[in-house]
Image (cartoon, helix red, strand yellow):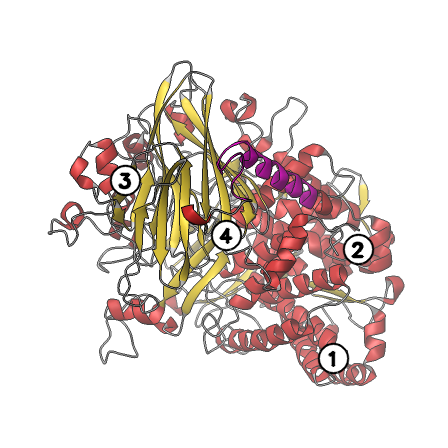
């Protein structure tokens, strides 16, 4: 097997031979409106730091830019700015609506695409569509504010600004000639019918690190540095190599300071003569005094004005590297000393070929060109959304008077319990705009995709959340910046085991030290769950929010009325899966260290008690399983009254299906003492096995299964899951049964009426913030877990177990065939149908038919439960990118292979 250049670069990076990962797309596309920038504290984050302020106000904790890159600690940033001579200010960052402004919550209102990327970011491609008419900022804001939750979002395409193709395609590509030598090419194409002007400003700037303990006293500086063939901006920073941004020709260089324009924002005198929006004011308002004539500062730009004929393109080349003009090496001096001439293109061609070879290595031969391109764009989005994230809670709380360690009477400030946190890392984000912060359970799913292209980075990401500067001393994993104390589903153990299994198959052995460390930290997290989320000590969990927004009757992140408590089917199922994952990890570690055998027994017993608690013997009135409906429901317990089963068929009741794990029989033969002690528990408490699958019963190839559902329960739940009038959509599994479209569920409590209705698109309820959209659409993460469960069941039952699919069709399939059918429906979201239309783009004719749109995919947060159109955040590759994993898995795995070897998550990788 031949290892290509990208594989070699990855190895050099992780073995610390060459710093190929020093520069990458780590620059956010939105820093304004985040919790980190929330000051003053009498306003919410969206109101405290707005998009309108962003061009003039220096950030405290990060930076943002358009199609940008930065170093691993975001000290120095490079991005582009644009101006069409019609907008009121430069386009330096993406625009969108905040949660209170959008009729369905916050949402970016721009069109941009992550077209390509490799794990070392040695080749990257980005496309932005910039209108030639004035950008409709006010129209987007006012129209969305007027719309109700019953109406769809008002998008940029709806304004008509693209109707006559009066826009520019701005394509930005990067290629690394060396770790410290980054080539940048910007191609601007006028898609309109007339010649049109556009200004391009490649911009280099320093993150504002004033009052930051990590930067010392020396102020960084940018300055002009002409060279024999053109202009350059030189960057000098203590502890970092000097860098130079080169361009050809005599281009104006503009310099200012990355400091707040206090006069504009706060009506106060400016501390600096030159401020953050100085370049904007120079270009847009023609204020010559706004930039520094000495050509020095902490923010600098090269200013191009282009007049592009209709249908024509302009290509501009730049080089960002460590080489000073007097020290240019021979390899840099292409074509007689010009580093930006024809040899420049040769480097791009080489990196593109290497990227092609890299993706060929992970794409099954059976996958057609269209699915291969979907897979590649999904993974490109994952790699583009790696971000530098900086948040020091000790310092942040001190600044706001809320630090409980340094103040005797701290103010009440969000995240006070997390004063130990110091986050300063490259983190995989769900989305660089919608979520400029990490989300712990999103990250677990992201690592499944990341492991396809960069296994070491996937492992790093899982380790981050378990590090002492993230994990709370009490064992809780941080949720997200808005509220670290919120409760996300405990999927970290599942992802850890999944990534370990991938490494074991790919490299021949797993990283035991990594697994051991993760197991120890996850044991702390498991203990937190047991102690905090099972208050009645009944092995039934009240997880709270659990990421599913308002899928149920109540807002589960809030205290229920009348001291009622909600016993959650999904929370308990998540914990059952957690037990199974920890049991599997302990067994793996016990092969090498017998100490872990006791831990395996511990988690095995937890599994028995938690799984059996969902359905006791008896009248079945106080359990989560409803024998009449054949489904799991949440249970509402109120003081001095009988419990009430909230009979809403939703993803909450499907998640117990996911708590299923199959173990090879030889594992138990390795640990006879463990089996003996487990059988003592069976003998002592036989009732634990009465209503769950009997884990003592071997089946296909002597395998054992741990599952909440015995065969009867499994068949009953699957009959709901595979019913097209309930959960089975043409495009995957819905979050809520379609039954409630015509039969809304009503519940009355304390004279309040609560209604749950199937809504295939956006929710009409803001019960849990503006983005509460789990009442019908299709979501990739839970679909992926359901597919994993079906494949687990298949390895146990084999081909003899068949179910009707779809329910009522008379067509019976094995569980492998069922899983492949569901995966095909999910992948179908991005495939062209017989009319050439992609379901993801719904009725947007521009996206469906225009050759400059229809092949550029957007990976939306969720999808219409009936027609498959994309909804919510438009760049949620954080979990919708799982389509790449599904394409790879079902493009290579066969039923025969699964039956013979068991379900293995990694099947294709021709690297090592």
CA gap, disc 4 and disc 3:
24 Å
The image quadrant of residue 527 is: bottom right
Q: Nearer the N terminus, badge 3 or badge 2?
A: 3
Q: Secondary structure at mark 4?
A: loop
Q: Label 2: how many residues lie within 10 Å, few (<14), some (14-19) or many (20+)?
A: many
Compared to 545, does 149 lie above or below?
above
- Closer to the chain start, of discs 1 and 2, is 1
* Foreground tag (4 vs 1): 4
Give the left or right position of residue 562, taking residue 254 as reference.
Answer: right
Verify whether residue 355 appears in magenta.
Answer: yes
Label disc, if present, on residue 829 of the rendered structure = none
> Position of 98 compared to 685: left or right?
left
List the residue tagged with mark 3.
254
Q: Which image quadrant is residue 494 in?
A: bottom right
- The part of the chain drawn in magenta is 331-359
Disc 1 to disc 3, C-alpha distance? 63 Å
Q: Nearer the viewer, mark 1 or mark 3?
A: 3
Badge 4 is on which residue? 180
* SS for callout 3: strand
**Gap in angstroms between the C-alphas marked 1 and 2:** 27 Å
Residue at which label 1 appears: 590
């Amino acid at each position: 097997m031949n290892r290509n250049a990208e594989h070699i670069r990855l190895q050099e990076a992780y073995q610390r031979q060459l710093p190929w990962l020093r520069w990458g797309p780590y620059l956010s596309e939105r820093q304004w409106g985040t919790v980190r920038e929330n000051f003053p504290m009498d306003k919410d984050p969206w109101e405290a730091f707005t998009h309108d302020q962003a061009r003039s106000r220096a950030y405290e904790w990060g930076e943002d830019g358009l199609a940008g890159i930065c170093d691993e600690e975001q000290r120095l940033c490079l991005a582009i700015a644009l101006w069409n001579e019609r907008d009121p200010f430069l386009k330096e960052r993406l625009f969108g609506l905040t949660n209170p402004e959008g009729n369905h919550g916050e949402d970016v209102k721009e069109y941009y695409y992550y077209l390509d990327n490799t794990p070392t970011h040695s080749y990257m491609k980005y496309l932005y569509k910039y209108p030639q008419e004035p950008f409709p900022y006010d129209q987007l804001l006012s129209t969305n504010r007027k719309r109700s939750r019953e109406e769809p979002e008002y998008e940029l395409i709806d304004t008509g600004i693209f109707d006559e193709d009066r826009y520019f395609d701005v394509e930005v590509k990067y290629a690394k000639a060396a770790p410290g030598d980054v080539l940048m090419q910007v191609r601007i194409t006028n898609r309109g019918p007339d010649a049109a002007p556009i200004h391009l400003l490649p911009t280099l700037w320093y993150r504002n690190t004033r009052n930051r303990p990590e930067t010392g006293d020396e102020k960084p500086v940018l300055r002009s540095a002409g060279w024999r063939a053109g202009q350059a901006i030189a960057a000098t920073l203590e502890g970092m190599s000097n860098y130079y941004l080169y361009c050809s020709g005599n281009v104006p260089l503009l310099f200012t300071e990355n400091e707040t324009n206090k006069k504009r924002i706060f009506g106060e005198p400016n501390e600096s003569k030159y401020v953050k929006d100085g370049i904007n004011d120079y270009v847009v308002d023609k204020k010559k005094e706004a930039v520094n004539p000495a050509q020095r500062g902490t923010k600098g730009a090269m200013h191009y004005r282009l007049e592009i004929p209709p249908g024509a393109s302009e290509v501009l080349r730049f080089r960002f590297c460590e080489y000073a003009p007097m020290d240019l090496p021979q390899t840099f001096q292409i074509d007689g000393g010009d580093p930006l001439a024809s040899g420049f293109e040769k480097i791009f061609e080489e990196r593109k070929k290497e990227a092609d070879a890299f993706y060929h290595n992970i794409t099954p031969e059976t996958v057609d060109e269209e699915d291969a391109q979907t897979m590649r764009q999904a993974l490109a989005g994952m790699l583009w959304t790696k971000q530098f994230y900086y948040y020091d809670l000790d310092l942040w709380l001190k600044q706001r008077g809320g630090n409980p360690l340094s103040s005797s009477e701290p103010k009440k400030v969000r995240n006070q319990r997390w004063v130990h946190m110091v986050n300063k890392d490259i983190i995989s984000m769900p989305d660089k705009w919608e979520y400029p912060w990490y989300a712990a359970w999103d990250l677990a799913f992201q690592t499944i995709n990341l492991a396809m292209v960069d296994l070491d980075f996937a492992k790093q990401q899982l380790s981050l959340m378990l590090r002492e500067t993230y994990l709370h001393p009490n064992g809780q994993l941080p949720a997200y910046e808005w509220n670290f104390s919120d409760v996300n589903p405990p999927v970290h153990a599942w992802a850890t085991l999944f990534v370990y299994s991938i490494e074991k198959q790919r490299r021949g052995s797993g990283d035991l030290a990594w697994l051991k460390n993760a197991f120890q930290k996850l044991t702390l997290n498991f203990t937190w769950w047991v102690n905090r989320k099972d208050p009645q000590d009944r092995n039934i969990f009240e997880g709270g929010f659990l990421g599913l927004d308002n899928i149920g009757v109540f807002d589960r992140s809030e205290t229920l009325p009348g001291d009622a408590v909600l016993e959650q089917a999904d929370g308990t199922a998540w914990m059952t899966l957690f037990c199974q994952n920890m049991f599997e990890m302990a067994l793996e570690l016990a092969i090498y260290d017998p100490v872990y055998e006791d831990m395996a027994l511990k988690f095995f017993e937890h599994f028995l008690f938690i799984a059996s608690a969902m359905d006791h013997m008896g009248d079945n009135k106080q359990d989560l399983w409803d024998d009449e409906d054949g489904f799991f429901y949440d249970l509402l317990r109120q003081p001095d009254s009988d419990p009430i089963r909230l009979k809403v068929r939703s993803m909450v009741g499907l998640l117990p299906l996911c708590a299923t794990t199959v173990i090879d029989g030889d594992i138990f033969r390795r640990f006879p003492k463990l089996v003996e002690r487990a059988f003592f528990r069976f003998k002592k408490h036989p009732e634990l096995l009465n209503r769950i699958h009997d884990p003592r019963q071997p089946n296909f190839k002597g395998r054992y299964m741990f599952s909440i559902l015995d065969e009867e329960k499994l068949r009953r739940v699957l009959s709901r899951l595979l019913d097209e009038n309930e959960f089975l959509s043409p495009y995957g599994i819905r979050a809520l049964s379609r039954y409630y479209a015509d039969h809304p569920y009503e519940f009355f409590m304390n004279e309040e009426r609560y209604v749950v209705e199937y809504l295939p698109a956006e929710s009409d309820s803001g019960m849990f913030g503006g983005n509460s959209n789990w009442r019908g659409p299709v979501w990739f993460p839970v679909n992926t877990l359901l597919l994993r469960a079906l494949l687990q069941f298949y390895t146990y039952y084999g081909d003899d177990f068949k179910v009707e699919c779809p329910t009522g069709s008379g067509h019976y399939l094995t569980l492998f065939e069922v899983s492949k059918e569901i995966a095909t429906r999910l992948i179908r979201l991005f495939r062209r149908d017989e009319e050439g239309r992609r379901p993801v783009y719904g009725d947007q004719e521009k996206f469906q038919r225009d050759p400059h749109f229809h092949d550029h995919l957007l990976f939306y947060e969720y999808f219409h439960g009936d027609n498959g159109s994309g909804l919510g955040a438009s760049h949620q590759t954080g979990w919708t990118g799982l389509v790449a994993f599904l394409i790879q898995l079902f493009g290579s795995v066969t039923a025969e292979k699964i039956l013979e070897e068991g379900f293995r998550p990694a099947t294709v990788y021709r690297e090592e």
